[in-house]
Amino acid sequence: MENRKLEIYTFIAHPNRKPTENVVLEDVFGNDLYLKLKNGFPNFVDTFPPLQIDDKTAKIEKIKNGNEVKSIFKFNDSLRYIAGKIMIGDDDGKEQDVVESNKEKTVLYTKKKGQSVERPYYFMIIVPLGLKYGFIVLEREGKHSAKGVFDKLFRKFVYENLSGLNCKISNFVESEIIKEYLEFGQYNSITLSQKIISSDKAEQYLGTYIDGSKYKVELRIIPLENSVIPFNTKKKILKNLENNEGFFEGTEFRNIGFDDDANVKVVATKDGNTRTIDLEDTFKVRPYYVINVANNNKGFSDFKNINKEAKKLIRGFDLNIL
């Protein structure tokens, strides 16, 4: 089992230059987006030109079972979602050595220019009945994200299959859910970070200071064993969320380099789901949700398991869409 991040987005379809005139997705001039995705999305991805996605390659992952080759792609007509694994290839313009993970780092072979390294990502698209918006769920693996490529693929698919409509994709941010996590969740950690500390504070930490240098300082608070984050601390964070004030009161934090521009990030668990809430600057909330999934024999997420956990996560939002 391994921790994975899921990114969650909402999307709407609208006429060109009319982003407020979003349409009901199951009846766009007689076209149902869900049916279009179910019947055409895999082939659309498999045949999409790399030149239109910055020379990256994209295809639905395939598995071989005897003489049969099947795409990792499924759909559910009653819940109106499609899900699968998309392979995205990158680094085609670079020549790179592939080495053994040993002390000698023996070169096994060299990847030539024009060859891409493919990485699989889980995806889910939900098109609920009667709504003017849908949901996209994407797997993120460390620094690797499918968002950029998937965004272009999905927008192009909507444009070609829904009478030239444009698509707007936004972070899924549910303020009430965020407050639930912050107020009632179990805090796994609180991270305070100051992007640039003053020269005198840098000298306090480092013993000396080099003119013109910039340093960032972080303080992470992690409850151990049976310890918990105090409720009054949670109240401070909620006050910070709502009023942009309260957490850095007093002189204690300032004495070690933190001020009102410092950032607060909370990792909290509620109802078995773990959420990273990043209150940077104007309290932008990133659409990342941490889940625990099994790996397949290649070391990537097992499709059946991550699909199960993704549905569980969405159902935990009480949106009544799955």
Image (tube, rainbow, N blue to C red):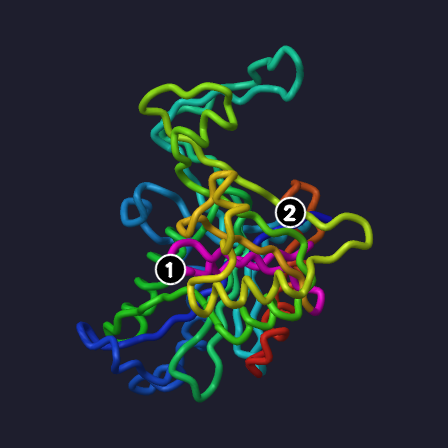
Q: Position of residue 203 (x, y in %)?
A: 46, 25
Q: Is residue 71 visible?
A: no
Q: In terms of depth relative to the viewer, which is nearer, 131 or 40?
A: 131
Helix, strand or loop status at disc 1: loop
Task: Provide residue 77's location: percent of width, then percent of height.
Answer: 56, 80
Amino acid marked by disc 1: Thr
| Kind of residue at badge 2 | Ile
Per the model, the C-alpha gap separating discs 2 and 1 is: 22 Å
Where is residue 160, by image quadrant? bottom left
Q: Residue at x 43, y 54 (%)?
A: 280
Q: For mark 1, does the 10 Å Cα neighbourhood hold few (<14), some (14 to 19), or many (20 or more) residues?
A: few
Q: Residue 214, located in which quarter of the rendered image?
A: top left
- Magenta residues (range): 271-292
Tell me which label, 2 or 1, sits earlier in the chain: 2
At x 41%, y 36%, the residue is 197
Q: Nearer the viewer, residue 277 or 311?
A: 277
- Of all residues, the one furthest to the left in this rendering is 17
Instruction: Answer whether residue 30 is visible to the viewer in this image.
Output: yes
Q: Which residue is mark 1?
A: 282
Horizontal side of 49 relative to 297 (left or right) equals: left
Residue ID for mark 2: 221
Q: Which corner quadrant holds the C terminus?
A: bottom right
Q: Is residue 98 above or below residue 11?
A: above
